[in-house]
Image: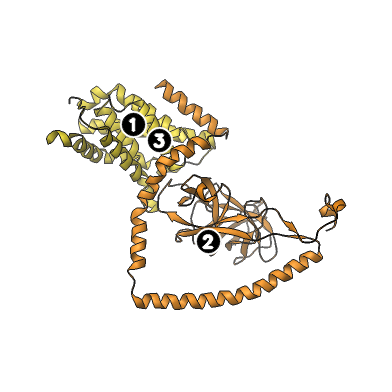
């Protein structure tokens, strides 16, 4: 009894001081992770069944729709390529550096329920695929969250709406920087740090600002849906709705962003130390 | 009830694995708040009826597994489970004679104690707000105890009947 209690308390203390217990957790997770797959098996089977038992007509309509979408996206990409080139050129004029693109890995959600008060989901890709903690996770519409803990076969992803999560954002319209904090509800983010006279309106798009280094810059996060200025308080009450459909999607994208910016113009050796002086 | 040595280790293991699956089964948000601590209920049953098979060590190991399964800090379920199983082992002779209602009361306090311990550890980690629904699994766990009791006594008697 005493041994068990002392051992657990020792574990708790070492983990709290955030030392290297990852090895223990990884080893134990090899036994436990199959259970997660087992529990989500019925859902996976159902999904596969509903995928394979579809009428020809339905498949055809979906195919048509997808082809149309593909066309639209392709045209948009054409423009995007031109814009990207232009952006690089303009940045080169400013002697600024340009960030390289990102690499993504598609991961599928496992339908398990970890803790009712935390917005943490489990996906089927882990360290065996090179996933590591603090990687940003996206879906087709926007930012979903970040990798919270990576285990060999699964990884845990904290959604942006988790009460313990905060994401640095900027207003797309005017570049106003702030932080969006999770509210604990799946359809709401809170922006607690803006004064009542801030230039922000309902309908404004919030994108990642790239500050903090976890999330790459420029991905859509949420749309502001309410702005209430409170004259007697220092900060306004602002809420936003996440762009990503957090409760619906089954496929997520885990992103590797190249965090080292690549300079476009090879600078002389002497200026290497003070790149900011040029700006 | 005599201690039945024929009950396989695998049967106990299987029930515990099933309990761990039930712990993470996907439910709607409202039902997830009610999901009781299945692993603890199963551990309590086995420690009451097979105290020579399931001891504090097993409780500790399965607590550790639960920690990893639920992504908690390592050791918090291990601590809670080993303390509760210690209490159960201490009183198992008396508890086995109790009628179901009195047993239910005991289970209620066990689950309450476990939830309290978990809350204390969570609070030490970082001060947390406490939802009233945090205590709901204690009540549902107590209500579900007769069911667990029935199923597990069927499991433990299964081979003896044959």
Mark 3–mark 1 contact, CB under 8 Å? Answer: no
Vertical order, B84 against A250 (above or below): above
Which residue is found at the position 36% from the left and 44% from the top?
B23
Occupied quadrant, residue B38:
top left
Which residue is found at the position 73% from the left and 71% from the top?
A86
Chain letter matching colour yellow = B
What is the CA distance from the residue labelled 3 to the residue labelled 1?
Answer: 10 Å
Q: What subunit carries mark 2?
A: A
Residue hosting label 3: B115
What is the CA distance from the residue labelled 3 to the residue labelled 2?
Answer: 36 Å
Question: In what element is the residue under mark 3?
Answer: helix
Q: Is residue B110 left or right of residue A90?
A: left
Q: Residues within 10 Å of mark 2 (few under 14, many from 20)?
A: some
* Disc number for residue B127: none
- Looking at the picture, tell me which residue is in the foreground, B35 or A36: A36
Chain letter matching colour orange = A
On the question of residue B54 being in view, the answer is yes
Residue hosting label 1: B109
- Looking at the picture, tell me which residue is in the foreground, A152 or B21: A152
Name the quarter where the N terminus of chain A is drawn: top left
How many marks are shown on the rendered structure?
3
Q: Are marks 2 and 1 on the same chain?
A: no
Q: Nearer the viewer, mark 3 or mark 2?
A: 2
């Amino acid at each position: 009894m005493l041994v068990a209690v002392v051992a657990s308390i020792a574990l708790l203390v070492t983990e709290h001081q955030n030392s290297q217990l990852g090895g223990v957790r990884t080893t134990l997770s090899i036994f436990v992770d199959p259970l997660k797959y087992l529990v989500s098996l019925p859902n996976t089977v159902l999904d596969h069944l509903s995928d394979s038992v579809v009428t020809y007509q339905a498949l055809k309509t979906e195919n048509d729709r997808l082809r149309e979408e593909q066309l639209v996206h392709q045209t948009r990409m054409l423009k995007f390529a031109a814009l990207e080139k232009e952006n690089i050129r303009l940045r080169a004029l400013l002697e600024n550096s340009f960030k390289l693109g990102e690499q993504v890995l598609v991961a599928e959600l496992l339908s398990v329920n970890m803790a009712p008060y935390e917005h943490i989901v489990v996906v089927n890709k882990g360290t065996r695929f090179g996933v590591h903690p603090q990687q940003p996770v996206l879906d087709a519409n926007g930012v979903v969250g970040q990798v919270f803990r990576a285990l060999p076969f699964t990884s845990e992803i904290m959604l942006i709406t988790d009460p313990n999560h905060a994401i640095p954002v900027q207003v797309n319209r005017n570049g106003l920087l702030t932080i969006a904090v999770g509210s604990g509800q799946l359809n709401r983010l809170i922006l607690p740090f803006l004064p009542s006279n801030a230039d922000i309106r309902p309908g404004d798009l919030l994108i990642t600002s790239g500050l903090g280094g976890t999330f790459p810059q420029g991905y859509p996060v949420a749309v502001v849906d309410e702005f209430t200025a409170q004259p007697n308080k220092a900060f306004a009450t602002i809420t936003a709705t996440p762009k990503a459909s957090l409760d619906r999607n089954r496929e997520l994208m885990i992103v590797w962003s190249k965090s080292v910016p690549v300079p476009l113009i090879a600078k002389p050796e002497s200026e290497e130390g003070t790149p900011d002086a040029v700006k | 009830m005599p201690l039945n040595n024929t009950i396989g280790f695998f049967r106990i293991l299987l029930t515990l694995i099933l309990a761990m699956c039930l712990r993470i089964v996907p439910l709607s948000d409202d039902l997830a708040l009610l999901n009781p601590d299945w692993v603890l209920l199963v551990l309590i049953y086995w420690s009451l009826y097979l105290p020579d098979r399931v001891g504090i060590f097993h409780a500790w190991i399965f607590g550790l597994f639960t920690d990893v399964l639920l992504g908690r800090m390592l050791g918090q379920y291990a601590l809670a489970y080993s303390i509760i199983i210690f209490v159960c082992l201490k009183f198992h002779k008396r508890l086995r004679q109790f009628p179901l209602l009195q047993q239910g009361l005991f289970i209620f306090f066990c689950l309450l104690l476990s939830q309290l311990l978990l809350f204390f550890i969570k609070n030490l980690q970082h001060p947390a707000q406490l939802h009233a629904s945090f205590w709901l699994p204690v009540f549902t766990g107590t209500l579900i105890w007769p069911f667990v009791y029935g199923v597990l006594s069927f499991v433990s008697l299964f081979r003896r009947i044959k």
